[in-house]
Amino acid sequence: MPEYPATIARRVVHEIEIKRSRFITYLAPVTSVAEADAFIAEVRKKHWDARHNCVAMITGVTGDQARSSDDGEPSGTAGVPMMEVLRHRDMTDLVAVVTRYFGGIKLGAGGLVRAYGGAVSEALDHAQRVHRRALTAVRIDVPHAEAGRFDNLLRDWAARHDSTLGDPVYGAAAVFEAWAPEAELPALIADVATWSSGALTPVVGETRVTDVPA
């Protein structure tokens, strides 16, 4: 099954202090470069009085778009180490902004690299990681009388087969949607047939890269 870079579930703010300089890291999951730029602008507006608001961002399902900024720090001492942490953690659709309030003590190039990289790394330690998988949609229309039993069976099945479930929709029947790896589809179809004594046949739909919380 193909592996894709991960992202995070929600925004994170984390602060560290190094030699009286404050490093405030903001992480945000994003779906586009425009959304990342809007977040960067939001942080810069909030911390307009800070000496530096340095940036690293990676977007795209495969992490193929990346950009960083030292924002006045010596070249290569802020945005690049921040980006290296994101790459090392195999992240995408994520923007990191580290705001620095200078404490009066110079850190030197090596100290800055460690500070900015460490700030992002510590912030990521506090984030909920969201894995991504290529999963295929499977729709199962279940009579209302069987809905509760199938809900329990499908939840148990998804947990054991690296799959996820959508929210049920109740209309003329109870409609369940499972997202499963392609290799698991034969097992799901066979199990649904067993659970329903052959009365139900799942409908296989599209395949897409889907978030799966860790």
Image (cartoon, rainbow, N blue to C red):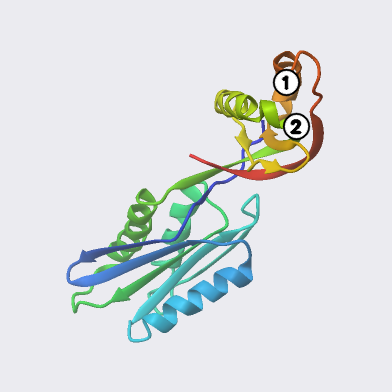
Q: Is residue 202 visible?
A: yes
Question: Taking 134 as reference, is 96 left or right?
Answer: left
Q: Position of residue 149 (x, y in %)?
A: 61, 24
Q: Position of residue 117 (x, y in %)?
A: 37, 58
Question: Relative to the observer, which residue lies in front, 49 or 196?
Answer: 196
Q: Position of residue 43 (x, y in %)?
A: 43, 76
Name the residue rendered at 33%, 82% in the picture.
51
123 up-or-down from 41: above or below: above
13 up-or-down from 151: above or below: below
Q: Amino acid at mark 2?
A: Ile
Name the residue rendered at 25%, 71% in the picture.
22
Query: What residue did someone put label 2 on?
Result: 140
| Label 2 Cα neighbours within 10 Å, binned few <14 / some 14-19 / many ≥20 | many
Residue extending furthest bottom?
49
Query: What residue did someone put label 1 on?
Result: 192
What is the number of the mark on residue 95?
A: none
Name the residue rendered at 72%, 13% in the picture.
194
Q: Position of residue 93 (x, y in %)?
A: 57, 57
Count of all numbered marks drawn on residues in the image: 2
Q: Is residue 89 visible?
A: no
Using the numbered discs, state the Cα–Cα distance from disc 1 to disc 2 in whole angstroms. 9 Å
125 up-or-down from 30: above or below: above
Screen quadrant of the N terminus? top right
